[in-house]
Image (cartoon, rainbow, N blue to C red):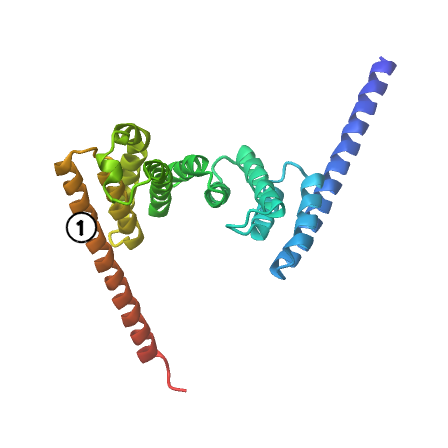
Amino acid sequence: MIAKSAILVAFVVCLAFAARAQNESKAASRAELISGVQAYELADYENAIQHFEKAVDLDPASVVAHSYLATACAQLFVPGVDSPENVTWATKALEQYKEVLDRDPANVLSAKGMAYINMELKNFDTAKENYKKVAAMDPNDPESFYSVGVMDWSMATRDIKAEKVKLDADSEDALFLSESCTDARVAVLSNIDDGIDMLAKAITMREDYADAMVFMNLLYRLRADVECSNQQAHDTDLKQADEWSDKAMAAGRKKAEATKKNNQDSETAAPPR
């Protein structure tokens, strides 16, 4: 009986020490987070990253620490630069965004961050999957559907350009009239149609979404390229493209006029100096 009591006491003591150590570790992690945020606000991102990495080491379960670390790494990533160092920052950011999402699957900001970096790395397939997850998290956000549509356009454009290069022809209708058109159509049509569907949803949610209308125009032009000697379908797609181009310009003018009016109203309402 005495032996059992001694074992129980020892076990309780061990738990108390473990809890104390855990609390101290979390407190130290919070201190590192504060230092990291201060460095981040001064745009000293490398110093901020060092503090956030220590915070993660001290409290690996902290979603906030992983999120801050991902954001700081993303700040050092420069889109369009293929240097090993730049790719390293992108990779670190993606790893930390994943850590956040593993712990908090509904974290929209991390999902958007992951999608954006994959897009800039030209990982279009992965970026599309990421943006679709974002759209599922927040189905009322038109920008997520727009982003999926842009990824669809990016992949279809890449594949169609590759086919046109093989043809080595200057004519705009070279692919449309070629024997390889059918294979190209099979390769790209699902992305084109998905992109049109996603952009249509975005425009339904945001009536004057000029950017989405621009990509609708571009997607219909891509679809015209792979109508494969079907002149009627080809012409119909181009007509649709022109209509979306006109809508985009009209929406752009409307936005510019609204901005101008708001500026004029602000100037009128401003008190005299």
**Is 268 left or right of 86, judged from the image as shown?**
left
Q: Quadrant of residue 229?
A: top left
Q: Which residue is painted at 18% across and 42% down in the image?
A: 237
Quadrant in which the N terminus appears: top right
Residue type of the residue flagged with mark 1: Glu
Q: In which quarter of the image is residue 159?
A: top left
* Total numbered labels placed on residues in the image: 1
Q: In which quarter of the image is residue 199?
A: top left
Pick the front one: 11 or 149: 149
Q: Could you tell me residue 17's position as x and y percent?
A: 79, 33
Q: Is residue 139 visible?
A: no
Question: Can you name the residue that lies furthest to the left here?
Answer: 232
Q: Is residue 233 visible?
A: yes
Q: Which residue is painted at 61% across and 41% down in the image?
A: 92
Structural crowding at the residue carrying mark 1, measured as other residues with C-alpha within 10 Å and reported as few (<14), some (14–19) or many (≥20): some
**Is 80 left or right of 55, judged from the image as shown?**
left
Q: Could you tell me residue 249's position as x and y percent?
A: 23, 58
Determine whether the residue tagged by mark 1 lies in a helix, strand or loop: helix
Pick the front one: 25 or 138: 138
Q: Could you tell me residue 152's position as x and y percent?
A: 35, 39
Q: Could you tell me residue 189's position as x and y percent?
A: 28, 32
**Relative vertical location of residue 221 with respect to residue 37 in this rendering, above or below:** above
Quadrant in which the C terminus appears: bottom left
Pick the front one: 174 or 143: 174
Question: Can you name the residue that lies furthest to the top here?
Answer: 1
Q: Which residue is painted at 20% across and 55% down in the image?
A: 246
**Is 6 left or right of 143, judged from the image as shown?**
right
Q: Which residue is painted at 43% across and 38% down in the image?
A: 124
Q: Mark 1 points at which residue?
A: 243
**Is 221 left or right of 126, judged from the image as shown?**
left
